[in-house]
C-alpha cells in the first residue's frame, strides 16, 4: 500500500498566462539575475584591465588606485541597485561618482561629500588645469591632482557605460565600444609604442565580459579557449604590424612607461601649485667641451595664464639646421663648441646651450626658432647626439645697466594681463630703488635668493589661502621649487615693464676629472630670461638652491659685488629645505615645515601618492568580493546545518534531509513546486536529473523515510538519513555544477534578486520563487 498523500497546503491559483518575453516592470528584458553578482565583478575587471595602457601616459601608481576606487564603487552601486529597478542604476552610479570626486578633490563640499556651487567651481578649475597639462605636456605626465581628477572621472564614467551595456541591458559584446575608448586614449596620446602586456590585459578584460551570458557559463572551458586564441591572435597581429614597418602603437620590448625605449620627455607646464614628482635619477645627456657651466635650454614659455601658470605656444616657422643660424643675442660673447650625447631623452625639443650658431644633427626634421631660442620638431624624437657651436653672452653688469633703445622683441613678452594687483604692488615695492631694467631684475632675483630672503627651496608648495596661487606663494607660503620661483619672477618682471619669459631645461650636471659632464633627470630646472636692448635674452635664476647647482652669470656676480652684497661664490648658504620658514603674516595660516628634497621625493602627497586611495580600493574590492561569496558561503552553512540534523535523527531530521535534497535540485536547475507530494517530487528529481541505480534507490529510500516520519510518526534513527542525502546530492552534482550554482545558488538567493529572470514558459514544473515557505509534500501539521 502506498504512503498516503495529502493535498498541497496552499494550492496556488492558476497563474495568468504570461506575455511572451515579458519582463517585470522596471526591469530590462532578458537581464539574467545572476549578473547582479557577477556583473559588477566582470565590469570592474574588464575596465581596469583595459585601462592598464594608461601606465604609459601617467606616471606612478596613484592613478591606478584612483581609477580602481571609482570603478569598484560604480560597479558595487550598480550591483546593489539592479535588483530594485534598472532605471535607477545609471543615475545612482553617477551620483556615487560625483560624491566621490567631491570628497576627494574639493574642500568645500557640504558635509564633505555633497557638491555645491563652490565644489563645482573647484572641480571645473581642476579639469581646466588637466586640459592645460595634457595640451602642453609630454607623456608620461605627472600624477597631479588635476590629472588624478580626470582619471577618476574618466574611469568612473567608462565603468557606468560598460555596466549599463554588459549588465543592465545584457549586451556584453556592445560594451567593447567604451572599453575601446579606454584603450584608445593612451594609444593616441603616447608617441611611442605601448607595452605588449596592455594588449593582453585589454583582450582578457573584454573576454571576461563576453562570458556574462547564461549560455556562456555552461561553456566556460570553450569560452576561455576563445579568449586565449583572441589574445594570441592580437599579439601576433601587433608583432606582424611592427615587423612590416608600420607606426603601430604596441611595444614589443616590454616598456612600462614613457616611450618604447624608456626615454624621458620634459613637461613644459610650470604650475604654481602641486608637487614635483621625481623618479630615480636617470642619465639623459653626456656633454664634452663645455668650458663654462651654463644652462641647457630645451624650450621657453611665453604665455602666462593666471591661476594656471606658464605654457608653451606653437613655435614660429624655424630655420633648418643645415647651415649657420642667425644669432638671437648681441654684444660681447665667448664662442664654444660642445658635443652632446643623448642617453635617454625624447621630446619635441632639442636642448641647446647659450645662443647656438650652428648645430649638426642626423635628423633633417629639426628647425631653430630664433624668437623662442629653441630647436624643435613636429614630432617627438630622440636624436642620438649632436655637435653645437654657440655664443655665450658676456656683457658686464654696467653694460646691461646702460642698455637702451626701442623694445624690438615681441610685445607678448610684456603681457601681464590678469595678474593680481597685489603681485604688481609687490614687484614695484621690491624694485622701488632700481632705476634701470637690469637693476629691477637684480632686485627681484635678490628678493628670492638674497641672504635675508624668507624664501626656501622645497619640492612641496605650502597650502594656499588667498585664492590666487601667485599671491599665496609670494605672501604666505614662500616655499617651492624652481618652477614656482621662475614663474613668479618672470611675472613680476613683466609687471615692472621688463620683457621676460620662463626657460625650461637642465642645469649643467656633474663633471668628472676629464671635464665631461653627465646631466640626469635630477638636473631638470626652470629659470628666467629677461630681454635687454642691444644684448637680447639674459639669464637670471631666482631659485634658492643650496646644492651648488645654481649658475650665476658673470654680470650677476658683478652686480652683487658692486652693490656690496655677498659674491656668488661666497654667498651665505640658504636654509636647508627642512628648515622652518619664517613666521607668517599676522592672521595668516602657519605653513607646515617643508620637507627636504629627499623626503619630498620619497613621501607621497595626499593628492598624488598617499596609500589611502589604495586602502579604500582594497576595502571596496573586499566588499564586492563579500557580495559575490556570501550566497555560496550561506549555502554551505545550510548544508552543514541540515546534514547535522539529519545525522542526529529524531524530530526535524526528515525535514532537514528533504530540504537539502530539494535545495540541491533547485541549485542545479530543477526547482520542485510546493504543490508536489513527496513521491511526486522524488519522481520529478529522478527524471529531470537522470538518476539511476544506487542514487535513484537512495532517493526512493529517503522519500519513504520522510513520508514515514511526517505521516506515520516514525522518527528516523540517527545515521539513517545522512547517507542517502549525500548519495543523492553527489549524483545531482555529477550532472555538472555551473558557475551560477556555485556562486549564486538558487536555493538561497532572495526573490528580489531572482525576479530579473522569468521561469521558462515551456517548463511547467519551474516556479518563480527562490525560497518557498512550504516544502514540497510537507503536511500542514506533523504528528
Image (cartoon, grey):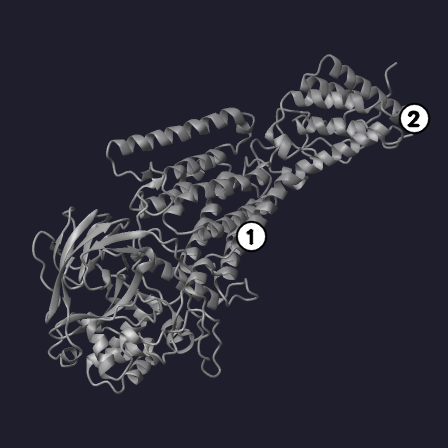
Q: Do the residues labelled 1 and 2 touch (CB within 8 Å)?
A: no
Q: In this view, does 261 lie to the left or right of 725?
A: left
Is residue 5 visible from the viewing direction of this image? no
Residue 228 at x, y percent in the picture: 45, 28
Residue 152 at x, y percent in the picture: 46, 53
Residue 678 at x, y percent in the picture: 80, 23
Tell me the residue that label 1 is attached to: 615
Q: In this view, does 683 lie to the left or right of 493?
A: right
On the image, which quarter does residue 35 sit in?
top right
Tell me the residue that label 2 is attached to: 713
Above or below residue 480? Residue 64 is above
Q: In which quarter of the image is the C terminus?
A: top right
Above or below residue 640? Residue 482 is below
Q: In this view, does 704 lie to the left or right of 338?
A: right
Query: Residue at position x 81%, y 21% from top?
Result: 703
Residue 139 at x, y percent in the picture: 33, 51
Amino acid at each position: 500500500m502506498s504512503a498516503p498523500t495529502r493535498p498541497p497546503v496552499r494550492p496556488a491559483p492558476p497563474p495568468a498566462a504570461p506575455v511572451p518575453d515579458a519582463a517585470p516592470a522596471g526591469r530590462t528584458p532578458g537581464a539574467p539575475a545572476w549578473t547582479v553578482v557577477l556583473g559588477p565583478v566582470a565590469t570592474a575587471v574588464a575596465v581596469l584591465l583595459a585601462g592598464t595602457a594608461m601606465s604609459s601616459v601617467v606616471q606612478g601608481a596613484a592613478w591606478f588606485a584612483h581609477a580602481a576606487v571609482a570603478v569598484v564603487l560604480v560597479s558595487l552601486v550598480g550591483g546593489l541597485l539592479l535588483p530594485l529597478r534598472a532605471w535607477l542604476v545609471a543615475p545612482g552610479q553617477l551620483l556615487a561618482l560625483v560624491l566621490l570626486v567631491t570628497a576627494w578633490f574639493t574642500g568645500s563640499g557640504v558635509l564633505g561629500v555633497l557638491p555645491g556651487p563652490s565644489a563645482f567651481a573647484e572641480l571645473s578649475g581642476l579639469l581646466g588645469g588637466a586640459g592645460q597639462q595634457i595640451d602642453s605636456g609630454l607623456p608620461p605626465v605627472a600624477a597631479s591632482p588635476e590629472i588624478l581628477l580626470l582619471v577618476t572621472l574618466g574611469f568612473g564614467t567608462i565603468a557606468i557605460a560598460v555596466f549599463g551595456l554588459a549588465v543592465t541591458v545584457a549586451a556584453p559584446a556592445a560594451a567593447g565600444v567604451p572599453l575601446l575608448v579606454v584603450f584608445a586614449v593612451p594609444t593616441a596620446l603616447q608617441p611611442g609604442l605601448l607595452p605588449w602586456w596592455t594588449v593582453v590585459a585589454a583582450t582578457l578584460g573584454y573576454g571576461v565580459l563576453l562570458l556574462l551570458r547564461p549560455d556562456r557559463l555552461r561553456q566556460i572551458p570553450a569560452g576561455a579557449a576563445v579568449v586565449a586564441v583572441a589574445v594570441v591572435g592580437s599579439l601576433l597581429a601587433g608583432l606582424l604590424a611592427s615587423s612590416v614597418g608600420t607606426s603601430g602603437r604596441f611595444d614589443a620590448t616590454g616598456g612600462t612607461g614613457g616611450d618604447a625605449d624608456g626615454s624621458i620627455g620634459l613637461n613644459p607646464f610650470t604650475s604654481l601649485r602641486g608637487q614635483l614628482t621625481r623618479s630615480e635619477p636617470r642619465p639623459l645627456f653626456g656633454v664634452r667641451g663645455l668650458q663654462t657651466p651654463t644652462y641647457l635650454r630645451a624650450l621657453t614659455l611665453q604665455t602666462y595664464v593666471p591661476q594656471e601658470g606658464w605654457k608653451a605656444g606653437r613655435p614660429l616657422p624655424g630655420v633648418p639646421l643645415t647651415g649657420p643660424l642667425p644669432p638671437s643675442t648681441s654684444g660681447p660673447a665667448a664662442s664654444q663648441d660642445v658635443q652632446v650625447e643623448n642617453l635617454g631623452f625624447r621630446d619635441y625639443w632639442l636642448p641647446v646651450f647659450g645662443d647656438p650658431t650652428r648645430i649638426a644633427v642626423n635628423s633633417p626634421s629639426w628647425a631653430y626658432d630664433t624668437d623662442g631660442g629653441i630647436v624643435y620638431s613636429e614630432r617627438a624624437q630622440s636624436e642620438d647626439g649632436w655637435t653645437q657651436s654657440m655664443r655665450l653672452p658676456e656683457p658686464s653688469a654696467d653694460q646691461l645697466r646702460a642698455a637702451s633703445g626701442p623694445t624690438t622683441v615681441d610685445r607678448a613678452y610684456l603681457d601681464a594681463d590678469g595678474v593680481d594687483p597685489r603681485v604688481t604692488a609687490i614687484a614695484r615695492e621690491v624694485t622701488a630703488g632700481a632705476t634701470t631694467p637690469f637693476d629691477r631684475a637684480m632686485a627681484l632675483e635678490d628678493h628670492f635668493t638674497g641672504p635675508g630672503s624668507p624664501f626656501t627651496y622645497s619640492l612641496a608648495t605650502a597650502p594656499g589661502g588667498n585664492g590666487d596661487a601667485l599671491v599665496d606663494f609670494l605672501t604666505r607660503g614662500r616655499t617651492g621649487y624652481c618652477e614656482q620661483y621662475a614663474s613668479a619672477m618672470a611675472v613680476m618682471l613683466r609687471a615692472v615693464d621688463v620683457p621676460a619669459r620662463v626657460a625650461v631645461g637642465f642645469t649643467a650636471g656633474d663633471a668628472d676629472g676629464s671635464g665631461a659632464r653627465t646631466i640626469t633627470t635630477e638636473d631638470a630646472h626652470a629659470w628666467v630670461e629677461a630681454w635687454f636692448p642691444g644684448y637680447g635674452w639674459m639669464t637670471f635664476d631666482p631659485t634658492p638652491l643650496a646644492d651648488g647647482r645654481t649658475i650665476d652669470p658673470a654680470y650677476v656676480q658683478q652686480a652683487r659685488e658692486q652693490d656690496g652684497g655677498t659674491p656668488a661664490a661666497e654667498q651665505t648658504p640658504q636654509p636647508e629645505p627642512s628648515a622652518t620658514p619664517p613666521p607668517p603674516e599676522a592672521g595668516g595660516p602657519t605653513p607646515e615645515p617643508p620637507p627636504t628634497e629627499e623626503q619630498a621625493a620619497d613621501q607621497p602627497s595626499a593628492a598624488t601618492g598617499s596609500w589611502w586611495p589604495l586602502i579604500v580600493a582594497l576595502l571596496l574590492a573586499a566588499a564586492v568580493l563579500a557580495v559575490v561569496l556570501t550566497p555560496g558561503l550561506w549555502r554551505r552553512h545550510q548544508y552543514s546545518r541540515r546534514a547535522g540534523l539529519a545525522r542526529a535523527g529524531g524530530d526535524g531530521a526528515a525535514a532537514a534531509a528533504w530540504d537539502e535534497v530539494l535545495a540541491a535540485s533547485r541549485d542545479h536547475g530543477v526547482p520542485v513546486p510546493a504543490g508536489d507530494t513527496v513521491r511526486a517530487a522524488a519522481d520529478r528529481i529522478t527524471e529531470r536529473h537522470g538518476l539511476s541505480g544506487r542514487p535513484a534507490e537512495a532517493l526512493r529510500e529517503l522519500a519513504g523515510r520522510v513520508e514515514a516520519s511526517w505521516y506515520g510518526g516514525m522518527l528516523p534513527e540517527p545515521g539513517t538519513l545522512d547517507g542517502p542525502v549525500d548519495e543523492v546530492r553527489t549524483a545531482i552534482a555529477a550532472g555538472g555544477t555551473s558557475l551560477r550554482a556555485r556562486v549564486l545558488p538558487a536555493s538561497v538567493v532572495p526573490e528580489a534578486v531572482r525576479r530579473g529572470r522569468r521561469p521558462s514558459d515551456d517548463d511547467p514544473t519551474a516556479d518563480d520563487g527562490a525560497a518557498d515557505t512550504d516544502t514540497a509534500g510537507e503536511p500542514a501539521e506533523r504528528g
